[in-house]
Amino acid sequence: MKKPMLDFDDLKYLNGLLKIYPASAEKAASKQLAKCALDLQGKAQLQAPKDLGDLRGSAYANVEGKDLIPETPDTDPTTPRAEKTKGGKLEAVIGFTEPYALIQHEELGFRHTDGNAKYMEKPYMENKDKYISSIGKAVQNALEKAEVNDGSS
Protein backbone atom coordinates (compact mmCIF):
# COMPACT_ATOMS: atom_id res chain seq x y z
CA MET A 1 0.00 0.00 0.00
CA LYS A 2 1.42 3.33 -1.05
CA LYS A 3 1.60 6.02 1.68
CA PRO A 4 0.26 9.45 0.81
CA MET A 5 3.09 11.87 0.29
CA LEU A 6 3.23 15.51 1.24
CA ASP A 7 5.63 17.66 -0.65
CA PHE A 8 7.56 20.62 0.73
CA ASP A 9 4.92 23.13 -0.38
CA ASP A 10 2.17 21.17 1.36
CA LEU A 11 4.14 21.09 4.61
CA LYS A 12 4.97 24.76 4.33
CA TYR A 13 1.28 25.53 3.79
CA LEU A 14 0.25 23.33 6.71
CA ASN A 15 2.79 24.92 9.04
CA GLY A 16 1.53 28.33 7.96
CA LEU A 17 -2.03 27.36 8.82
CA LEU A 18 -0.99 26.00 12.20
CA LYS A 19 0.68 29.30 12.98
CA ILE A 20 -2.09 31.52 11.63
CA TYR A 21 -5.15 29.78 13.03
CA PRO A 22 -4.28 29.74 16.71
CA ALA A 23 -3.12 33.37 16.64
CA SER A 24 -6.15 34.69 14.80
CA ALA A 25 -8.53 32.58 16.85
CA GLU A 26 -6.93 33.57 20.14
CA LYS A 27 -6.94 37.25 19.19
CA ALA A 28 -10.62 37.06 18.24
CA ALA A 29 -11.49 35.23 21.47
CA SER A 30 -9.56 37.77 23.56
CA LYS A 31 -11.26 40.71 21.85
CA GLN A 32 -14.72 39.20 22.33
CA LEU A 33 -13.94 38.22 25.93
CA ALA A 34 -13.06 41.88 26.60
CA LYS A 35 -16.43 42.95 25.17
CA CYS A 36 -18.20 40.39 27.37
CA ALA A 37 -16.23 41.49 30.45
CA LEU A 38 -17.16 45.13 29.91
CA ASP A 39 -20.79 44.16 29.34
CA LEU A 40 -20.86 42.18 32.59
CA GLN A 41 -19.10 44.98 34.46
CA GLY A 42 -21.73 47.46 33.26
CA LYS A 43 -24.63 45.19 34.14
CA ALA A 44 -23.15 44.51 37.59
CA GLN A 45 -22.59 48.22 38.23
CA LEU A 46 -26.25 48.93 37.48
CA GLN A 47 -27.36 46.23 39.93
CA ALA A 48 -24.87 47.03 42.71
CA PRO A 49 -26.39 48.73 45.75
CA LYS A 50 -26.06 52.49 45.60
CA ASP A 51 -25.79 54.85 48.50
CA LEU A 52 -23.11 57.39 47.54
CA GLY A 53 -22.02 55.49 44.42
CA ASP A 54 -18.59 54.44 45.71
CA LEU A 55 -19.31 50.74 45.23
CA ARG A 56 -20.51 51.16 41.65
CA GLY A 57 -17.55 53.41 40.90
CA SER A 58 -15.05 50.82 42.16
CA ALA A 59 -15.90 48.29 39.45
CA TYR A 60 -13.11 47.08 37.19
CA ALA A 61 -12.48 44.53 34.47
CA ASN A 62 -9.28 43.18 33.01
CA VAL A 63 -8.49 40.57 30.40
CA GLU A 64 -5.17 38.79 30.21
CA GLY A 65 -3.77 41.05 32.93
CA LYS A 66 -4.67 44.34 31.22
CA ASP A 67 -7.24 46.76 32.60
CA LEU A 68 -9.97 47.44 30.07
CA ILE A 69 -10.72 50.85 31.54
CA PRO A 70 -7.93 52.91 33.11
CA GLU A 71 -7.79 52.21 36.80
CA THR A 72 -9.48 54.72 39.07
CA PRO A 73 -8.21 55.17 42.62
CA ASP A 74 -9.91 53.18 45.38
CA THR A 75 -11.76 55.20 47.97
CA ASP A 76 -9.95 52.93 50.42
CA PRO A 77 -6.37 52.57 49.12
CA THR A 78 -5.57 49.95 51.79
CA THR A 79 -7.85 47.50 49.97
CA PRO A 80 -6.03 45.77 47.12
CA ARG A 81 -7.75 45.08 43.84
CA ALA A 82 -8.65 41.46 43.31
CA GLU A 83 -5.76 39.47 41.94
CA LYS A 84 -5.34 40.23 38.28
CA THR A 85 -4.49 37.64 35.71
CA LYS A 86 -0.81 37.42 34.90
CA GLY A 87 -1.37 37.39 31.16
CA GLY A 88 -0.84 34.54 28.77
CA LYS A 89 -4.18 33.02 29.72
CA LEU A 90 -7.48 33.80 28.10
CA GLU A 91 -9.14 34.95 31.30
CA ALA A 92 -11.15 37.90 32.54
CA VAL A 93 -11.40 39.32 36.05
CA ILE A 94 -14.35 41.54 36.89
CA GLY A 95 -14.87 42.89 40.38
CA PHE A 96 -15.28 45.75 42.81
CA THR A 97 -12.55 47.16 45.04
CA GLU A 98 -14.54 48.61 47.92
CA PRO A 99 -13.89 46.68 51.17
CA TYR A 100 -17.61 46.12 51.69
CA ALA A 101 -18.25 44.83 48.14
CA LEU A 102 -18.28 41.15 49.12
CA ILE A 103 -20.68 41.53 52.03
CA GLN A 104 -22.99 43.70 49.92
CA HIS A 105 -22.93 40.98 47.24
CA GLU A 106 -23.56 38.05 49.58
CA GLU A 107 -25.89 39.42 52.26
CA LEU A 108 -29.46 38.76 51.14
CA GLY A 109 -30.96 40.38 54.25
CA PHE A 110 -29.91 43.93 53.44
CA ARG A 111 -32.68 46.19 52.15
CA HIS A 112 -31.56 48.43 49.31
CA THR A 113 -33.58 51.23 47.78
CA ASP A 114 -31.35 51.16 44.67
CA GLY A 115 -29.58 47.94 43.67
CA ASN A 116 -29.50 44.46 45.14
CA ALA A 117 -27.40 41.60 46.46
CA LYS A 118 -25.83 39.14 44.00
CA TYR A 119 -25.16 42.06 41.66
CA MET A 120 -22.34 40.16 39.93
CA GLU A 121 -23.82 36.69 40.01
CA LYS A 122 -27.27 37.53 38.62
CA PRO A 123 -26.11 39.26 35.42
CA TYR A 124 -23.43 36.60 34.88
CA MET A 125 -25.93 33.76 35.15
CA GLU A 126 -28.41 35.59 32.91
CA ASN A 127 -25.79 36.24 30.20
CA LYS A 128 -23.18 33.45 30.40
CA ASP A 129 -24.65 31.43 27.51
CA LYS A 130 -24.70 34.57 25.35
CA TYR A 131 -21.08 35.32 26.29
CA ILE A 132 -19.91 31.77 25.54
CA SER A 133 -21.74 31.76 22.21
CA SER A 134 -20.37 35.14 21.17
CA ILE A 135 -16.79 34.08 21.92
CA GLY A 136 -17.31 30.86 19.96
CA LYS A 137 -18.72 32.78 17.01
CA ALA A 138 -15.78 35.21 17.08
CA VAL A 139 -13.32 32.31 16.93
CA GLN A 140 -15.29 30.61 14.15
CA ASN A 141 -15.38 33.85 12.13
CA ALA A 142 -11.64 34.33 12.59
CA LEU A 143 -10.94 30.80 11.38
CA GLU A 144 -13.22 31.22 8.37
CA LYS A 145 -11.60 34.55 7.55
CA ALA A 146 -8.13 32.98 7.81
CA GLU A 147 -9.21 30.23 5.39
CA VAL A 148 -10.52 32.77 2.88
CA ASN A 149 -7.38 34.91 3.16
CA ASP A 150 -5.22 31.82 2.70
CA GLY A 151 -7.15 30.86 -0.43
CA SER A 152 -7.99 27.43 0.96
CA SER A 153 -11.72 27.63 0.31
Image (tube, helix red, strand yellow):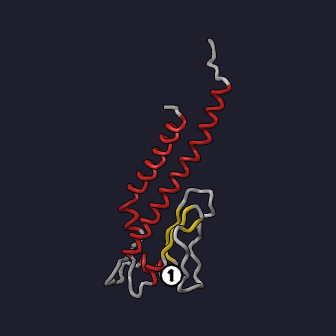
User: The N terminus lies in which quarter of the figure?
Assistant: top right
- Image quarter for residue 110? bottom left
Q: Position of residue 109 (x, y in %)?
A: 35, 81
- Image quarter for residue 22? top right
Q: Position of residue 145 (x, y in %)?
A: 49, 42
Q: Amino acid at mark 1?
A: Glu
Return the residue found at the far top.
1
Q: Position of residue 139 (x, y in %)?
A: 48, 47
Return the residue found at the far bottom.
52
In-front residue for pair 106/97: 97
Q: Which residue is mark 1?
A: 98
Q: Position of residue 82 (x, y in %)?
A: 56, 73
Residue 95 relative to residue 18: left or right: left
Q: Residue at x 62, y 32 (%)?
A: 13
In-front residue for pair 77/109: 77
Above/below status of 50 relative to 136: below
Q: Residue at x 59, y 70 (%)?
A: 83
Mark 1 falls on what kind of element?
loop
Q: Residue at x 55, y 50 (%)?
A: 26
Above/below status of 152 relative to 110: above
Residue 121 relative to residue 27: left or right: left
